[in-house]
Amino acid sequence: MNEVTSNELPGTEKLEELIELALAEARRLGVDQVEVAASHDKGLSTTVRLGEVESLEYSNDRGVWVTVYRNSRKGSASTSETTPEAIREIVAKANSFAKLTAADEHSGLADADMMCKDLRDLDLDHRWDIDAAAAIELALECEATALSYDKRIDNSEGATVSSNRGVQAYGNSHGFVGSFRKSSHDITCVVLGSKNGDMERDYYYSSARDPADLENVRSIGETAARRTVARLGARQIKTMRVPVIFTPEIARGFIGHAIGAIAGGAQYRRSSFLLDAAGEKIFPDFVSVQERPHLLKAIASTSYDAEGVATWDRDIFSDGVLQDYVLSSYSARRLGLKTTANAGGTQNLIVPGNADDLEALIAEMGTGLLVEDLIGQGVNGVTGDYSRGAVGHWVENGEIQYPVNEITIAGNLRELYKRIELIGNDQDLRGGIRCGSLLVGEMTVAGS
C-alpha cells in the first residue's frame, strides 16, 4: 500500500451526510436559505533538482463551508473539522454573521427550478498507484533527460511529479445535494541553458485526469530542453507592425481576456471593454467559443456549477457574435438576467479552428512574429488596452529564423479580436480553454 492510496478518501456518502447535517441545523435555526459545500483532497508531490530530492509533500486537506441567507443578509463560516459539533458551530456562526451584514436584494440561492437533476458520471476520477519512491524516480528520469539533451542545458529549476485525488459535495435548502470524485496528475520540468553569456529558461508539462493520458517523462524532459535551447541567441527586433502568431498555450489566454470581460461581475460593475456587448460582433465570422461542460475526463467538466445549477452545452460566441454573458445567479440578478450556470467559472471552452497546425500557420503568415511566452500583466480589462512583454521567434518566408526577446506586443483587444485570421486545429487540452495556434493579422511590436 503506498503513500497516495494508504488512506482512502471518504465516500461521497460521507460528505453528503455532513451536508445534510448542516442543512438540518440551519433549518432548526430558522434561516431563509442555506448552502453548504464540503471537500476532501489527498495528494503526493515531489520535486527533484540536479539529481537530488528537493521536496516531498503529502497533503490531506478537507473543509466544510456554510452560507446562510436571512432577510436578504448573508453570513458565511467554514471549518476543517468534520465532527457534528464543528458543523453545528459553523452554521451558528454563519447565522450570527448574517444578522450583522447589510441586506442585498440580489443575494440568495439560484432558482430552485434550475437545480441539477441529472448527476452524470463524467469519468473524472482515476487513481495513480504511485508511491513516493516511484514518483521520485520519474522526476529524476525527467530531469536527467532534459539535462542530457544538449550541452548548453547547464542548470535546472527541477522536475515535479504530483498526484491528487479528491471528493467534493454541495447541497442547499432547495433539496439539492450532489457529489463527485475527481483526480489530477501532473509532471513538469523546468531547465536553463546558456550560450556566450546568454541564459534562457523554459519548461514543459503534462497534466491529465487519468495517469494513462500523461506524456512520457522522457518526452516531457526533452521538450523542456528543446524549448530552452531554441531560445538561446535571442535578438531584439525593430519596432514595426506585423502579423503575430500565438502558440496554443498563449492563445487560450488571449481568448480568455474576452471571457473575463463578459463575466457578470465585470458587467454589473460597469468595468469591461465589452460592456453591454451581447448581440455584438466581437470576432470574425469563423470564430465560435463553445462551452461543453460534460466532456469525459476534461479538466473543467461538471454536471452542476457552484450553486447546484445544471450545466448545459451552449455557444457563448457564434459566428463571431456574443450570444450571452458568463453569469452566476447573483450577477444575473444584478443584470436582470438568468444565471448561465457559471458560478465558479466556465466549463471547458472550445474554440474550433479553421486551419491546420502551428507549422501551417507559420507558412501562411510568411513574415512576422511567433509568440511563445508572455511577460507581465499589461491587460486593461476596462479599456481593452493590451501590452505584454513577449518572447518568441522571428519568421521569414514561412520559416522560423531566430529567437527574439526584449520586445512588447500591443494593441486594443477590441481591434485585435477583429484581426484574427486563422486558428489552428492543434488545441492545447491541458486547460479550461481549448484553443489552437492563433494568427492575428497585425499588431504593434515594439523593439529597438
Image: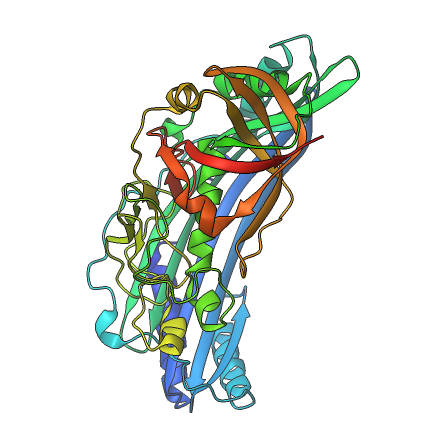
Tell me if I can see residue 316 in this picture.
Answer: yes
Q: Quick check: 271 above or below 121?
A: below
> As drawn, is 230 to the left or to the right of 125?
right
- Who is closer to the viewer here, 279 or 167? 279
Residue found farthest to the right = 197
- Who is closer to the viewer here, 232 or 128? 232
x 48%, y 43%: residue: 253
Q: How many marks?
A: 0
Where is residue 426, by image quadrant? top left
Where is residue 262, by image quadrant? bottom left
Q: Quadrant of the C terminus?
A: top right
x 61%, y 40%: residue: 57
x 40%, y 74%: residue: 330
Where residue 405 sits in the image (x, y, percent)? 66, 28
Where residue 236 sits in the image (x, y, percent)? 69, 25
Q: Quick check: 197 above or below 98?
A: above
> As drawn, is 338 to the left or to the right of 106?
left
> As drawn, is 158 to the left or to the right of 417?
right
Residue found farthest to the top = 151
Q: Quick check: 219 above or below 251?
A: above
Where residue 166 sits in the image (x, y, percent)? 43, 49
Look at the image and name its color scheme.
rainbow
